[in-house]
Image (cartoon, rainbow, N blue to C red):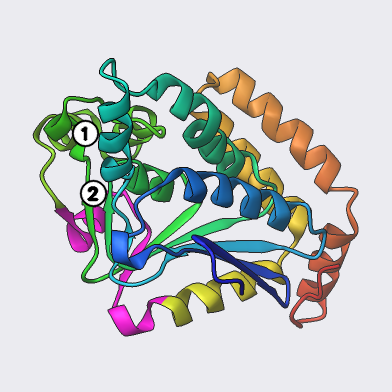
Amino acid sequence: MSDTSVRLDIDDRVATIVLNRPDKLNAFSQEMRTGLIASLDEALGNSAVRAIILTGEGRAFSAGADLGERARNMADDPKGPDLGHSLGSYFNPIVRTIRSAKVPVIAAVNGTAAGAGANIALACDIVLAARSARFIQAFSKIGLIPDGGGTYCLPRLAGRARAFGMALLGDPITAEVAADWGLIWQVVDDDALMDTAQAMAASLAQGPAEALAGIKKALNQSTENNLDQQLELERNLQQVLGHSADYREGVTAFSEKRKPTFR
């Protein structure tokens, strides 16, 4: 792993991406935004990678945008920063890349996940959180709306009432509450977080890659499709997977009462 604001390590088909500005609670600077995009592209461009873990160094997952950097920029330009450019060029591509990735992306939320940091975590396919973690939609506290896909994910994951409460009030939500609301998959003890994430990623990396990609595609599109469209998508995906070597291996392994070896 290189010593930068974002570290990438690829080992045994699992890519681990670490947000690495612990002294700034992994707040997104310009360097860190571009570093995360580059790390995701490198991981997804490696045909050996079958699963990705995204986590933070230190006591936070990410505090969101680096407001210190924003304040310095505002001092130079009284009109303020072009947040539309920042979202369109960096945060939105990050979220789109995570959602469209053909491999599972696991967020291992090791501490505070605030603002864009929270919503990037919630965009991942499986979210694990340390017991000490907190999720904060802090945008209203500084005169903004939730971004990074927050207004898309929150009502779909937690429901309208909870989404409005989180977004309007900006109060911290504990990891246990986040799990109870369906925002995340699982809460684990702090010292077990990375072991749990790595074991999960290793298991997914040994799974049927085409089927896992199909599951992601079908579930992501389900929120936009009507029933007929979703049934047709399932039919098309299943038709392709039914001819795959992994399906043949899965059925054969079931018949032979052994663990399948997917290729």
Say left or right for 82 vs 49: left
The residue located at (49%, 60%) in the rendering is: 5
Q: Mark 1 is on which residue type?
A: Phe
Comparing 214 with 253, the one in front is 214
Quarter of the image with the C terminus is bottom right
Comparing 126 with 17, the one in front is 17
Residue 232 drawn above or below residue 10? above
Quarter of the image with the N terminus is bottom right
C-alpha span from label 1 to label 2: 20 Å
Q: Mark 2 is on which residue type?
A: Trp
Residue 113 position within the rendered picture, expressed as x and y whole percent measured from the top left: 29, 54
Which residue in the structure is indicated by mark 1?
Answer: 139
Looking at the rendered structure, the secondary structure element under dot 1 is helix
From which residue to which does the magenta span run?
Answer: 173-193
Which residue in the structure is indicated by mark 2?
Answer: 181
Residue 10 drawn above or below residue 167? below
